[in-house]
Image: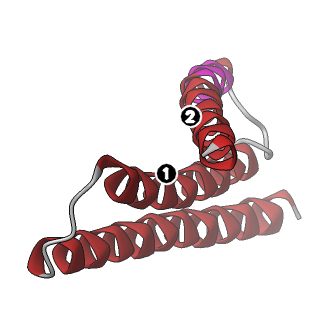
Amino acid sequence: MEEFVHDWTKIISLCLEFIAALLMAVGALEATFKLCRVSIFGSTGDLLRRGIWLGFARWIILGLEFMMAADVVSTIVSPTWDEIGMLASIALIRTFLSYFMERDLEAANRNKESV
């Protein structure tokens, strides 16, 4: 039974990692498309580029959440201390990344509302 659960957690973890990569790729493509469109049509301005960056940041944050879920799922079945330590360090790094990116998003939204 444990082997069955272990196999399914691997499959679920791989699916979550795939979704995370897909989300980040979609965000990168969207940001690239928007930057090309801005460059081609000659639109400039920090506000426009900032909006593109913020949209990309949202995709990255969502992807990081899915990656974190994949790491948690992969360590559910009989984790070793090494795996737990690695998960803790990865969680810490991703939490800091998400925190600072969300803080930037909130600051940008406050600036947009005040304009």
Q: Amino acid at mark 2?
A: Asp
Magenta segment, prevailing SS (helix, strand or loop) = helix
Residue closer to the observer: 110 or 31: 110
Q: Read off the residue under disc 1.
A: 57
Magenta span? 84-92
User: Relative to 87, does residue 22 appear above or below in the rendering?
Assistant: below
Q: Position of residue 106 (x, y in %)?
A: 67, 38
Q: CA distance from mark 1 to mark 2?
A: 9 Å
Q: Quadrant of residue 103?
A: top right
**Residue beneath the point at 63% across and 66% down:** 16
Residue closer to the observer: 96 or 16: 96
In the picture as drawn, the residue positioned furthest to the right comes out as 1
- Indicate the secondary structure of the residue bearing disc 1: helix
- Indicate the secondary structure of the residue bearing disc 2: helix
Mark 1 or mark 2: which comes first in sequence? Answer: 1
Q: Quadrant of residue 86?
A: top right
Q: Read off the residue under disc 2.
A: 104
**Residue beneath the point at 45% across and 57% down:** 51
Q: Are marks 1 and 2 in contact (CB under 8 Å)?
A: yes
**Residue beneath the point at 69% across and 69% down:** 12
